[in-house]
Image (tube, rainbow, N blue to C red):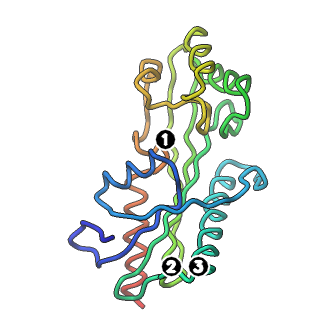
Amino acid sequence: MASTCNDSPSFKIILGSSSPARRAILSDMGYEFTVMSADIDEKAIRRETPEELVKALAEAKADAIQLNLADGCADRGSRDRPTLLITSDQVKVSKGMIRERPTSTEEAREFIKGYSGDVAFAMNYVLVTNLSTGGRKGGWDIPEICFHHIPDEFIEKVVKEGGMTCVAGGLRLMHPSSLPFIKELVGTVDSVRGLPRNLTEKLIRESLQETVEM
C-alpha cells in the first residue's frame, strides 16, 4: 500500500471510513489503502459549533481505530514504512443550524426545504494520524453551496425514495438529479462529497515530513 507520489517515501494508509465517496476520492488521488470503520456513537459526541463538532468526531474515530489496532496487535509501521490513518467528518450548516444525517423522513424534508433559494456550507474536518510517531495533523475545509429554488415535487420524490437522504445534510448534493438545483459551488466537489483532496494531500505531506525529521 504505497503512494504513487514519486517525492514521498513508501507508506501505508488506513482510511477510517466506510463511505463509498471517500474511498473513491482517495483512490482517485492515486493511493492504495485499507479500510477500517470506527464503531462509535456519533450522537453521544456533541459540541456547540459545527467546527468543534466535526473535529471532535474525526478525533473520536481515530481514537477508536487506534484502540482496535492496539488490541489486535496490528502492524503500526516503522520509520522506513510509516502508517497513516485518515479520519474525517462532515456536517452541513443551513440557516445557522447543524445538519447531520436526518433521523426521519420529516427531518430530511425539513433539511432540503431549508436549502431552497438559500446557501449552505459543508463543514469538513480531516485528521491524519501518523501511527508510527503518534503525531496528528488536521484541518478544516468549508465549501459554500448556493441553491436555486427546489420544487416540492422533487423534495417529496427523494424523501420517499430514501436513498438520497441518508447522508449528512439529508441530500446527496453531487447526485445528477440534485445538480440542476445548485446555483453555485464555492469550493470543490470532492470537499462536498466528504474528503477534500487538497487538504488531505497537505496533511499527508506534513505527516510524512514529521517522520523524516525524527
The amino acid type found where label 3 is placed reads Gly
Residue 134 in which image quadrant? bottom right
The residue that disc 3 covers is 72
Query: Which residue is labeled 2 in the image?
Result: 131
**Who's the residue at 60% across and 34% down the image?**
166
Amino acid at the residue labelled 1: Pro
Residue at left offset 20%, top offset 71%: 6
User: Residue 3's quadrant in the figure?
Assistant: bottom left
Mark closer to the chain start, 2 or 1: 2
Q: CA distance from mark 2 to mark 3?
A: 14 Å
Query: From this viewpoint, is residue 139 visible?
Result: no
Residue positioned most to the front: 72
- Quarter of the image for the C terminus: give it: bottom left
Q: CA distance from mark 2 to mark 1?
A: 29 Å
* Dot in front, 2 or 3: 3
Q: Amino acid at mark 2?
A: Leu
SS at mark 1 in the image: loop
Residue 110: x, y in percent? 70, 23
Reading the image, the residue beneath label 1 is 143
Position of 77 compared to 53: left or right?
left
